[in-house]
Image (tube, grey):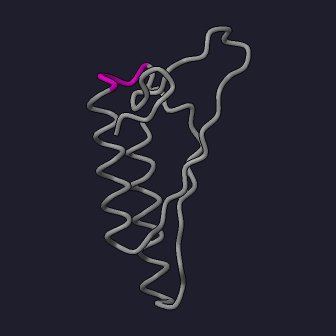
Amino acid sequence: PTHVAVRAVAALLDEERRAAPETQTAIVLVTDGVPAGCGDPAELLADVIGAVSDARIAGTLTYVIGVREPTLGAEPTAPWEEDGERVW
């Protein structure tokens, strides 16, 4: 799951910042925004948001790049969207 990866990378970046405090760190997530096959989507999304928030508090920026699988046909809706509009 994404939150596990974010926490693991954030821990490595914390070590980098301790070794070189002037270093700016960042995580880049590339996602379709739709959790699949890993449990309850709402809980997973909350876990990712928590992991990213913790990383930010520790000094690591996060950038998210949204992608869509063009072969899926109907466009999937990300958990934070309703009718194509951001809801949170």
Horizontally, is 42 left or right of 52 in the view?
A: left
Q: Is residue 40 magenta?
A: yes
| Residue 17 against residue 2 in the figure, above or below | below
- Residues rendered magenta in the picture: 37-41
| Residue 34 against residue 23 in the figure, above or below | above
> Considering only vertical position in the picture, is 23 above or below 60?
below
The answer to which of 43 and 9 lies nearer the viewer is 43
15 is within the stretch colored magenta? no
- Marker count (numbered): 0
- Residue at image position (47%, 59%) is 9
Q: Residue at x 43, y 77 (%)?
A: 15
The percent position of residue 13, horizontal first and vertical second, equals 47, 70
Q: Is residue 9 above or below residue 12?
A: above
Q: Residue furthest right?
A: 71
Where's the N terminus, which quadrant?
top left
Q: Residue at x 47, y 30 (%)?
A: 85
Overall secondary structure of the magenta stretch? loop
Front in this rendered view, residue 88 or 67:
88
Residue 21, horizontal then vertical, whole percent: 46, 90
In the depicted view, which residue is nearer to us: 35 or 5? 35
- On the rendered structure, is 37 left or right of 57? right
In the image, 4 versus 34, the foreground residue is: 34
Q: Position of residue 11 (x, y in %)?
A: 40, 65
